Amino acid sequence: MELTAQAGSLSAITSAREVKEPGNRALGVGLEARGVHAWFGDKHVLSGVSLDFWPGTVTALIGPSGCGKSTFIRTLNRMHEFIPGAAMAGDVLLNGEDIYAPGVDVTKIRLKVGMVFQKPNPFPSMTIAENVLAGLKLAQLKSENKDDLLEECLERAGLWSEVKDRLNTHGGALSGGQQQRLCIARSLAVRPQVLLMDEPCSALDPGSTLRIEETISHLTSSVTIIIVTHNMQQAARVSDYTAFFLSDGGPGQMIEVGSTNEIFSRPKDKRTENYVTGRFG
């Protein structure tokens, strides 16, 4: 009975969300992964993942620990290759162009495909304002009005009203949830097309988690979001599409992908059903 109730509650949450149709071309043609494999040394950790991430949508990646979710998103902005011994195969296309093609500037890719990590990582020696604008300085980008950009990014990250009177305070003085939203604001300052989020709420209290989820909801008008989460209710609340990953004794694979409502109410694969209803994982 308990498992049925949990599945029903997730289905109710997703049914209440407005379903976004893919392909809002005004934001670009999106991010595409084609047959992505990943290795750490001789260990094959991810096998043949193909996924489309439609502009203006949120896609949740779910599955047990060790199934390759975080490794996969690190292939989407070329972070995986900087791990010693790491390798990948397959194609990742942004607006139809291969981000791994010879001569592609990795720094420019990371401006377009930003990343928010599990643990908030504001620069401790910088003020709140300096943290938000740090990406511009590192990438040698110019802004006509940095004060307006600062306010805009903090507003979009849901933090402006809380910090507008203490912008010269060090970022490390903020609470954990505020620090995470500060990191989101920092990512937004360079105008990314895609924002990767690797369990951004795992270390946060419920109140801070709610604020991050509200921020995600507000951002999708202009940013495509891909979020790794172990929280099924969070996936149901924030995402338009959900992909289920699993490692069955071998490299991680994507078992199933669909609208979040379908994954939580009518999954096609029994393994997906068992996971989202809490029978394993």
Image (spheres, grey):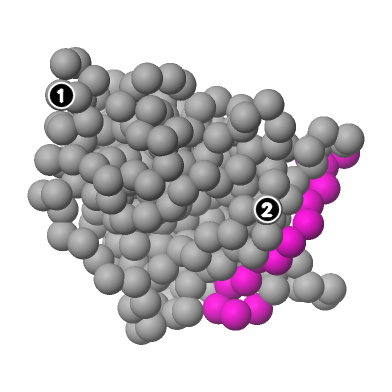
The foreground one among 154 and 271 is: 271
In the rendered view, would you say 119 is above or below 110? above
Label total for image: 2
Magenta residue check for 12? no
Query: Can the viewer see residue 214?
Result: no
Which residue appears at 20% of the width and 35% of the height? Answer: 10
In the rendered structure, the answer to whether residue 278 lies left or right of residue 197 reads left
The foreground one among 273 and 197 is: 273
* Element at label 2: strand
In the rendered view, would you say 175 is above or below 269? above
Which residue appears at 34% of the width and 78% of the height? Answer: 24
**What numbered label is drawn on residue 147?**
none
* x and y, in percent, of residue 153 in the image: 34, 58
Along the polypeptide, which appears first: circle 2 or circle 1?
A: 1
What amino acid is found at the position of numbered circle 2 in the picture? Gly
The CA span between labels 2 and 1 is 34 Å
- Quadrant housing residue 182: top left
* x and y, in percent, of residue 109 in the image: 64, 66
* Element at label 1: helix
Q: Which residue is mark 1?
A: 5
The foreground one among 68 and 198 is: 68
The foreground one among 271 and 142 is: 271
What amino acid is found at the position of numbered circle 1 in the picture? Ala
Crowd band around label 2 with a 10 angstrom C-alpha radius: few (<14), some (14–19), many (20+): some
Q: Which residue is mark 2?
A: 48
Q: Which residues are magenta?
A: 81-97
* x and y, in percent, of residue 137 in the image: 59, 60
